[in-house]
Amino acid sequence: MTSEKRIVRNTRLTLVFIHSMLAHGAFILGTLTLGTLLLATLALGACSGMGSGGPNNGADLPFESPYESPYNPEGLIRDENGRFAYWKDGALVSHTGVDVSSHQGSIDWKAVAADGIDFAFLRIGHRGYTEGEIYLDECFEDNYVGATSAGLPVGVYFFSQALNEDEAREEAHFVLETLGGRTPNYPIVYDFEPVSDVNGRANALDARQRTRNALAFCEVIKQAGYAPMLYGNAQDRAHYYADPLEGYPFWFAEYGTEFPSGQFDFSIWQYSSSGEVAGITTAVDMNLEFAPTP
């Protein structure tokens, strides 16, 4: 007799015994026997699904396949200047970009475009990480006019330190008002990062609040007809709940590696903060776009 048949037989006998005991007023003993029945039922479930000879053999348990990058490491080539390019089937299928802010000062955008740069992300503003005020990037207007006049497609990013959804929406509306109807070719990026200052107002936000803030920002941008995007490194990405933000592309930052290690989908890889580009007098962030953004 198999173990499952024995359990079913014993369960039936137990039910008969409980009925007999209760009929003679043996409530306490009947209660103890009922506990035995429950244990037997649990044992039956264990035997049917978990044992090596069980019919399901664990097949009904949830299983998540390991993440597989859509990019082939063999297609990623670094040139003598330290810039990456991605090739597929003998064709170049990537674009090289920079991202800049007032930290780079005045930029000669014609020289940038002539140095093999295909696109640029411009900081449009930021929120102070202690007092929480919103500021326009001092060089944004010059950068926007200069880059677009040089024929470079641009996107913009906002450095957020929002504490809640209302502040995140306030940041998104600031971006829209500053753009004033202009239409960047690349997305509008939500860039939330903890700061090194122990007094950083948003450093202690948990994953739930960070996700809510990001979602609030992206929804305002999307409703206005623009394409939202998220930015961060692997740790930043791990502090977001993935499901609510599904569908929003990710701009992944990771330095010092020959191939990005992110275990999630991303379309742009920021691979260096020390790039050298003609027309920019300081070190600059370098980016590789693997596939066209929305």
Image (cartoon, rainbow, N blue to C red):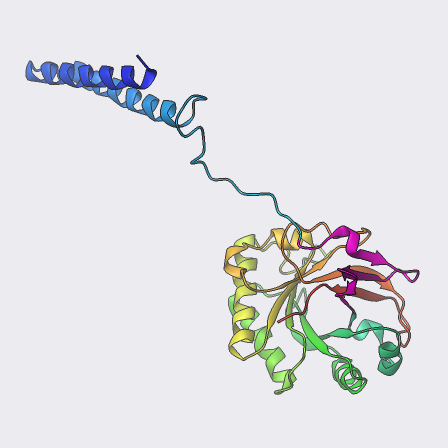
Identify which residue, 89 or 98, lies in the foreground.
Answer: 89
Q: Quadrant of the C terminus?
A: bottom right
In the image, what residue occupies the spot 52% across and 68% down? 216
Say which quarter of the image contains residue 121: bottom right
Vertical order, 108 against 44 (above or below): below
Answer whether residue 88 is magenta in the image: yes
Answer whether residue 261 is magenta in the image: no
Q: Quadrant of the N terminus?
A: top left
Say which quarter of the image contains residue 240: bottom right
Give percent across and percent down for residue 279.
90, 77
Vertical order, 125 against 53 (above or below): below
Could you tell me if residue 125 is visible in this image? no
Q: Is residue 220 left or right of residue 133?
A: left
Residue projecting furthest to the front: 89
Give percent across and percent down for residue 143.
78, 81
In the image, what residue occupies the spot 53% across and 60% down? 246
Q: Is residue 28 left or right of residue 217?
A: left
Q: Is residue 82 left or right of residue 238?
A: right
Vertical order, 270 against 58 (above or below): below
In the image, what residue occupies the spot 55% across and 79% down? 225
Tally the marks: 0
Give percent across and percent down for residue 223.
51, 77
Q: Which residues are magenta?
A: 70-95
Could you tell me if residue 256 is visible in this image? yes
Identify which residue, 185 or 285, lies in the foreground.
Answer: 185
Identify which residue, 144 or 159, lies in the foreground.
Answer: 144
